[in-house]
Amino acid sequence: MAAKKYPNFYYKDCVSCSICVQACPVGALDLTRAGKSGRYRNLFPELVNDRCIGCGLCAGNCPMECIHMRSDYEG
Ligand code: SF4
Ligand code: SF4
């Protein structure tokens, strides 16, 4: 059986649109990771609980293609 995969984010391409957060069927993502400036518009997505089922919907819906599913989670 293949190892469960988790979303890894390439934040340099992320535009904080929150589409991935809305696409997640189990509420595992939120825009809670502060950007360098700490301003609200610089919040980035991250896993906020252990509900992720590895479905890949977040990665599939990201308009910037900055989510990559991997067997480990680096944030
Ligand atoms: S892989 Fe699926 S369950 Fe996991 S964070 Fe992305 S949308 Fe949510
Ligand atoms: S969908 Fe992509 S660009 Fe939008 S907040 Fe999520 S990771 Fe960032």
Image: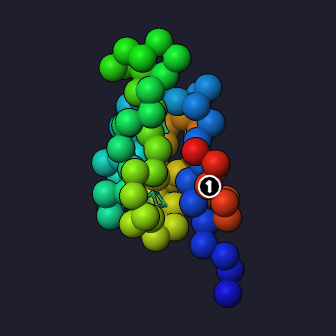
**Is the residue 52 above or below the residue 23 in the image?**
below
Q: Position of residue 69 (x, y in %)?
A: 62, 57
Q: Residue 15's x, y, as percent?
A: 47, 26
Task: Classify the position of ligand 1 by quadrant: top left, top right, bottom left or bottom right.
Answer: bottom left
Residue ID at (41%, 46%): 20
Q: Residue furthest bottom?
A: 1
- Picture quarter with the N terminus: bottom right
From the top left corner, tell me how far across and down residue 29 is, in percent.
39, 50
Secondary structure of the residue carrying tag 1 is loop
Q: Name the image quarter holding residue 24.
A: bottom left
Where residue 50 sits in the image (x, y, percent)? Answer: 43, 64
Q: Tag 1: residue type?
A: Tyr
Answer yes or no: disc 1 within 8 Å of ligand 1. Answer: no
According to the image, label 1 marks what residue? 73
Write down the quadrant of residue 39 in the picture.
top left
Q: Is residue 56 above or below residue 68?
A: below
Question: In the image, 39: left or right of 53?
Answer: left
